[in-house]
Image (cartoon, rainbow, N blue to C red):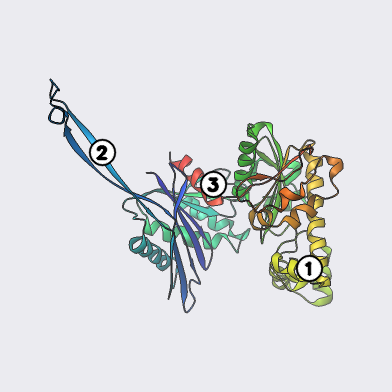
Amino acid sequence: MTAVLVVNSGSSSFKYQLIEMDSETTLASGLVERIGELMGQASHTVMAGVSRTGVTETVDVSAADAAASVSLHTSVSLVTETPYPESSTERELPIPDHTAGFAVMLEAFREHGPSLVEHVPVAVGHRVVHGGARFHEPTVITESVERDIDELSGLAPLHNPGALQGITAAIEAFPAVPHVAIFDTAFHQTLPPEAFTYAINADLAERFRIRRYGFHGTSHGFVARAAAEYLERPVEDVNQIVLHLGNGGSVCAVRAGRSVETSMGMTPLEGLVMGTRSGDIDPGVLFHLHRRAGLDVDELDVLLNRGSGLLGLTGRGDLRDVIVAADSGDGPSQLAIDVYVHRLKGYVGSYYAQLGRVDVISFTAGVGENSALVRARALEGLEALGIRIDPERNASRVRGPRRISADDSAVTVLVIPTNEELEIARQTLSKVG
């Protein structure tokens, strides 16, 4: 079997999945977190499956059949299949750095399975948030690539340094296989200049690489292809709007499988209202807060990235908690939901205009896949654009890809569960052949 290990590393944690690519089945997954703190935590889950053991025996057919005139021999494979349930383990121990974290991960594979001897990864795929304009496809990691990722940390100071720490530790743990970087920004390298260019001084923009890059690219690409497959149409024939709604959120307009517009910008701060990020805001607000409230650059950064969005409006950063509070009559929470869906609806209308024709709108990620309220309110009032939600379908909790639009809706509306890890594994395998 062909296995790929997928690693998504941050500054104090990393997630991993071991995926068997012949069947695209996740064999195991885990999380190592609180790296560098007094006590770290590690969890490891072995997915339910079937273990197969087999032997080959040679059978003498002439001995088994006295009427046989010729002595025949044949090999028969006797395979025993033993199902096993999903199992999880958790540990709490000091994890001083990412190298120690990978040692903990390898120990979990040795003790609880699946065996990395039997499922040797042919490659390790790494999620890297920011590739700038430099990286537009899966890239085998070399020392030069590591330097480039480090140099791009100025554009993603919260993400790229952690990814680099994970890459270094993973190469030490798996030195004999190729390591491939999959960039969140790569899918959006097809944006046309009019979509990625900010209207500021051109020399400054070029000097400091100021432009829209976009994020959540692995998710948007995966969902766009999955939606086309669901419709049984070539992705090249489908115009789509993909709404990736989680704690972070972004919208992408996809024409013929290519990103042509997206809501996040030079950083993941621009665009939708998110759990702790403001999304779109008048830059003049920052000047005002600096001059009148005395906030410096770092304080403004923290405010907009970690203290705004739903958290800033309500004191709650999780949309589920906001909805519960709104249902109980909490005014700020009701307003926050209104602001959240108002921004969503505005982007849907804008991207409809940019595409000219929309065949499908897809909701994905934690909020998009699970909140019928958000899906309904984001699209209500858009019937004139041919968008009609079926309330019963929308309320269904059936898992997997599903249609939630009415039969008479000109635009098909889908819920498509995203799988960024599988997308990273696919791209990794395509790169290493």
Provide residue 71's location: percent of width, then percent of height: 12, 24
Q: Which residue is mark 2?
A: 77
Give the amino acid type for the residue marked by disc 3 in the picture: Glu
Outermost residue, top side = 69
Provide residue 87's location: percent of width, then percent of height: 43, 62
Q: Can the viewer see residue 276 in this picture? A: no
Q: Which residue is mark 3?
A: 423
State the CA–CA distance, disc 1 to disc 2.
61 Å
Which quadrant is home to the N terminus? top left
Q: Which is more toward the observer, 350 or 30?
A: 30
**Is residue 302 positioned above or below 150 on the image?**
below
Are the residues at dot 1 and dot 2 in contact (C-beta closer than 8 Å)?
no
Question: Which circle, 3 or 1, is nearer the viewer?
Answer: 1
**Is residue 399 positioned above or below 69 on the image?**
below
Q: Earlier in the sequence, mark 1 or mark 2?
A: 2
Mark 3 Cα shell of 10 Å, populated few (<14), some (14-19), many (≥20) = some
Q: Earlier in the sequence, mark 2 or mark 3?
A: 2
Give the amino acid type for the residue marked by disc 1 in the picture: Asp
Are the residues at dot 2 and dot 3 in contact (C-beta closer than 8 Å)?
no
Q: Which is more toward the observer, 321 or 250?
A: 321
At horizontal 38% and vertical 65% (from top left) the residue drawn is: 103
Q: Earlier in the sequence, mark 3 or mark 1?
A: 1
Q: Can the viewer see residue 351 in this picture? A: yes
At horizontal 75% and vertical 57% (from top left) the residue drawn is: 373
Mark 3, secondary structure of its residue: helix
**Is residue 297 positioned above or below 205 on the image?**
below
Q: Which residue is mark 1?
A: 327
